[in-house]
Amino acid sequence: MRIKIILFTLLSLFSSLTTAAELIDLSVEQVQALQKNGAALVIDIRTEQEWLSTGIIPSSHKLEFFNKQGKYDAEQWLSELAKLKSSSDQPVILVCRSGNRSGMVGNYLTQQLGMKNVYHLSNGIQAWLKAGQKLDNACPNQLACN
């Protein structure tokens, strides 16, 4: 039964990929299902200080969008994102602390740039923590982070 639920969730998600570009909210369970599939690219857009304070979702990539002053360089960020993507249509899941910033960035990507296959973790890393899910150390070699 659980496999049927996961398959239904995945089919629902991927069927929405063929429609107009829009940001899709994901639950922790949906993020995990897409990670198991291996197709999705999880991007943590938080600041370095935030990564260090909580850790990051396993297999995610740290790609800060807003700096400490709230500024951003969308062109530079998109260039870095393109280097991480295995294909232009690869699903991208954005993660921030509470879902607010990832929602803003996701809406920018979908509504302004017309990108498809953009998702974000609803309620951000806080939801991941609340669900009791594992996080990786954002700085495996503490000497390099000091």
Image (cartoon, rainbow, N blue to C red):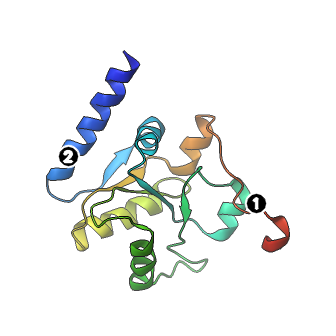
- Amino acid bearing label 1: Pro
Q: Position of residue 106 (x, y in %)?
A: 35, 62
Q: Are marks 2 and 1 in contact (CB under 8 Å)?
A: no
Residue found farthest to the left? 19
- Is 15 rendered above or below residue 116? above
Quarter of the image with the C terminus in it: bottom right
Question: How dense is the environment of label 2, judged by Cα within 10 Å: few (below 14), some, or many (20 and up)?
Answer: some
Q: Secondary structure at mark 2?
A: helix
Q: Position of residue 29 (x, y in %)?
A: 46, 35
Q: Position of residue 110 (x, y in %)?
A: 26, 65
Q: What residue is pinned by disc 2?
A: 16
Q: Nearer the viewer, mark 2 or mark 1?
A: 1
Question: How dense is the environment of label 1, judged by Cα within 10 Å: few (below 14), some, or many (20 and up)?
Answer: few
- Amino acid bearing label 2: Ser
User: Which quadrant would residue 138 be assigned to in this image?
Assistant: bottom right
Residue depicted at x 36% and y 29%? 6
User: Which quadrant would residue 128 be assigned to in this image?
Assistant: top right
Q: Secondary structure at mark 1?
A: loop
- Is 142 rendered above or below residue 127? below
Q: Position of residue 95 (x, y in %)?
A: 49, 56
Q: Which mark is residue 140?
A: 1
In this view, the residue in front, 65 or 141, is 141
- Is 119 rendered above or below residue 12? below
**Who comes first in sequence, dot 2 or dot 1?**
2
Residue depicted at x 65% and y 41%? 134
Quarter of the image with the N terminus in it: top left
